[in-house]
Amino acid sequence: MNREEFQKNSNLIVVKVGSSLLVDGGALQLDKVRELAHNIARLKEKGKKVILVSSGAVACGMSVMGFTKKRGGIPFKQAMSAIGQSVLMQAYREAFSPLGIQVAQILLAPEDTHNRVKYLNARNTFEALLHLGVLPVVNENDSVAVAEIKFGDNDRLSALVASLIGADLLVILSDVEGLFTADPRLSSQASLVEEVKKIDLEIEEMAGGEGNYFSTGGMKSKIIAARMATLSGIGVIIASGKDFSVLQEIGEGKKRGTFFWPEEKHLPGKKRWIAFAMIPRGSVLIDKGAKKAILDQKSLLPAGVIAVEGNFDLGDCVEILGPSRELVGRGITNYSSEELKKILGLHTDEVREVLGGKDFDEEVVHTDNLVLLGGE
């Protein structure tokens, strides 16, 4: 299948729209909202199911309150989000209603997806809304989010939603055309990368740092989101949304922006949850032998653990770090941090002696509950 066919055959699409495309001078541009609605409606007319991940609530709140500059502190942002979210949804409701499309608001926080039952319930809600022909409009629940536990930006949130629902295609719209070989504002030699087969170190280096040449979050956050989605078997397009008709062109199979091919060996549902939805509560540092073993699809044993960081319980998610503290993967631990500190570096017989002969798991993290995310 070529890119044109992939785009045409994508029936479930998540569209992420950055606030820079909807807000100007601190105010929501209703004409842009109507333009977005018209183009999403055209996609739905062609039989596509669409989920919209939209920023803009904080800007809407500031506009309503007459603020032109952000004030310091998380409570201010949370208050503006609480005020602005209803304004944003009302704008969407008024834009989509004449087109015969009902909208539904879904606000998510990391704790909503960390819990497996809540994660599955969220998926069921999305599926029910899509079955009814309703457009889900998703945003992070900033009004109650804790700074230390946030999705961080709607790029990552859109990838999580796409992974959760099993979308075919994630379209991230911002204010530049896609991934360039260098910052196009600084280099006349910069050229657009039309397709990416695999997100490797070279691609990550092209993305640069946070806020590199995207208005919010930087291209780096888009590449992180693309990696999440492609590992979940989802194609990704990063493109300019200055003209929302780009959605029609993408649906017709035209080459717009940068297309990231999904990984052929993508993660199954449970491992996607572990990798992208669970909140790591700590980390374990492993030696070279253990790293090689888990890269060979084996479980992590106590003998390969060098150190334990953080406080976690049995059943929590932990990050697995290699000898140089590189991220190797994430997994669900069979031991609490306190128990693991007692048995790290020990072999099975020694673990049995330390734990007093009680029932125990031979694996710190079983391979069925372990996701590889790097390390090579």
Image (tube, rainbow, N blue to C red):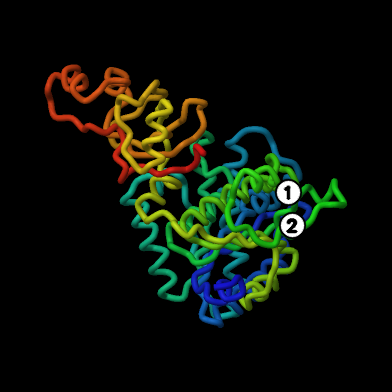
Location of mark 2 (residue): 175
Query: Left of 127 or right of it: where is 143?
Result: right
Look at label 2 and name its amino acid: Asp
Q: Nearer the viewer, residue 42 or 83?
A: 42
Q: Is residue 231 above or below residue 375?
A: below
Q: What's the residue at 60%, 70% (across, down)?
A: 3
Q: Position of residue 51 (x, y in %)?
A: 52, 65
Q: Residues within 10 Å of mark 1 (few under 14, many from 20)?
A: some
Q: What's the residue at 36%, 42% (across, down)?
A: 370
Q: What's the residue at 65%, 61% (across, down)?
A: 195
Location of mark 1 (residue): 215
Query: Left of 358 or right of it: where is 210?
Result: right
Q: Nearer the viewer, residue 62 or 228?
A: 228
Look at label 1 and name its amino acid: Ser
Q: Is residue 131 above or below residue 269?
A: below
Helix, strand or loop under label 2: loop
Can you name the residue that lies furthest to the left here?
A: 357
Q: Nearer the viewer, residue 18 or 23?
A: 18
Q: Residues within 10 Å of mark 2 (few under 14, many from 20)?
A: many
Q: Earlier along the polypeptide chain: callout 2 or callout 1?
A: 2
Marks 2/1: CA distance? 7 Å
**Is there CB contact under 8 Å for labels 2 and 1?**
yes
Query: Left of 194 or right of it: where is 79?
Result: left
